[in-house]
Amino acid sequence: MNIDLTPYYAQPGEQPFAARKMAMPWRNHVPLSPEQIAASWQTLRQQTVPARKRLLYLHIPFCATHCTFCGFYQNKLRDDSTAAYTRYLLQELALEAESPLHQSAPIHAVYFGGGTPTALSADELSQIIRAIRTSLPLAPDCEITVEGRSAGFDDERIDACLEAGANRFSIGVQTFDSRIRQRMARLFDRQQLIHFLENLCSRDKAAVVCDLMFGLPGQTAESWREDLAIVSDLPLDGVDLYALNLLPTTPLAKAAENQRVTLPAVMERRDFYHTGADFLANAGWHQLSNSHWAKTTRERNLYNLLIKQGADCLAMGSGAGGNVNGQAYMMERDLERYYAKLDNGEKPIAMMTPASKAGAWQHRLQAGIEIGRVALPLLTPQADVLTPLLHQWHEAGLTRDASTCLRLTNDGRFWANNLMQALQQLIPQLNAGESLPH
C-alpha cells in the first residue's frame, strides 16, 4: 500500500509543527433543517439507544463578569435571572425524564457547566441536583460535578450542593497571580482564592479540582511555578493544566489583535506545559489525561474521559450541547427562545445533525490520544504502513519509541491534537477495503 506520509512528518528543529491545533470532534457538520429537528428528536427520545456509557450535561448560562479569555459568555447575571431559569430547566427535565432515551441506560457522570453554575442560589442548586437524582437512572457511583467560581460560592451554596448529592467541584482558578487575575476580570485575589479552596476542601465530602491556565498575558515562568506550588500545597484532589486557546470573539483576542497585550509564543507555552507536567510528577501526582492530574484516589475525571471515549451525552439548559447515537445537538442560546419552546411543550433544540458516520476506531483514537497511549493495530490492520511516520515522530521526540503502540512523551502530549488529526486523515486511507477487529 502506497501512501505519502511525508505531509504528516514533524518539521526539523525544536518546533515540530507550525501551529498547535485544536481538537475537532468526529461529527457530521451538515445540520438538519429547522423543520426536521422536532421530528428527529421525537424519534431519538423514543429509542432505547445501544448500550454504552452515558453522561448528562446541564448548562447554566449566567456570569457576573465576562472574563477576557472566555468564548462561552452568554448572559449577564441579574437579580431575577436564576429563579426563572431554574423553573424552566426543571420543566425541561420533567419533559424528558421518563422517555425511553433517558431511562434506558445508567448515567455515569453529570456535569453542571456554564457560565457559572454557582451563580444559582443554594435552594436552586439543591432543587436541580435532587431532581436529577430522583428522576434519572444515575449509576451508584455517578460523578456529579458542579463547576464554579470562588466569588459568590459561599458556605450555604457549598453545603446545599453536598447535601443534595454533588460529589465533585471544579473551580476555575486559571492563575493565583492577583495582577493577572485583575486584568482578566477575575474578582478574588490570591489570598482570597487560597482561603476559599482551603475552606471548600476542609469539608472532605467531595473531590475538589481546579483549573490552571498557561499562556496568559503577563504570565512568566516564575509566576507559573508559583501557581503550581500553591496547587500542590493545597489539599486538592486534582488539577487541570490548560493552554490558553485564543478564541476570536473574546475581549482578549481583540486586545491581542490590536497589540494591546502580548501573548507567549507557542514554544513558550510548550515550556509551560513541560514545567507543569514535570512539577506534578515530581510531587507525586498521577496523570489521568493530557491535561489532568490526580493527587488522591477520590479524583476520577470521569466526565471528561468518557466524552473522549464516545459516550452519549444528554444535554439540558440554554446553550448546552449533546451527542446521542452519533447525532449532535445544541440547545437554544437565546433565553427567550429557550423559554418559549418549553412553554410550547417542546425540547428547545436550535441545531441538530444527522447521525455521524464515525466508527469505533475514531473514538478509540481520541480516547487513546487523551491518555497518551494508542494501540494502532486496534484501529487499522495496516498499522505497519505507518512505520516510517512513527520513526520520524519518535526522532522528533514526540513518542517514547517507534512501535505501533503510540506512547506520547510530554512533547507529544503538548502536540497531541496535531498527531490525532494526522491519524484521522491517514487511517481511513489504510482501512479502505479492509475489515477491522471489533
Image (spheres, grey):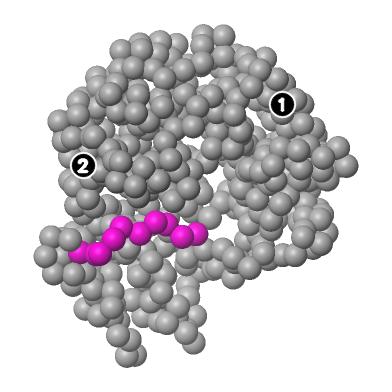
Residue drawn at 19 percent across, 47 percent down:
268
Q: Image quadrant of residue 191?
A: top left
- Position in image of residue 342 (x %, y %): 82, 39
Residue drawn at 68 percent across, 24 percent down:
81
Q: Image quadrant of residue 10?
A: bottom left
Is residue 194 visible in this depiction of the protein? no
358 over 114 or under it: above or below: below
Amino acid at pointer 2:
Phe
Q: Is mark 1 on a helix, strand or loop?
A: helix
N-terminal of the pair, mark 1 or mark 2, is 1
- Position in image of residue 78 (x %, y %): 64, 22
Residue under label 2: 272
Q: Residue furthest left?
A: 13
* Front in this rendered view, residue 16 or 67: 67
Residue drawn at 15 percent across, 30 percent down:
222
Left or right of 335? Residue 309 is left
* Front in this rendered view, residue 275 or 21: 21
Amino acid at pointer 1:
Thr
Residue extent of the magenta highlight: 16-25
Residue under label 1: 86
Left or right of 14? Residue 204 is right
Q: Quadrant of the N terminus?
A: bottom left
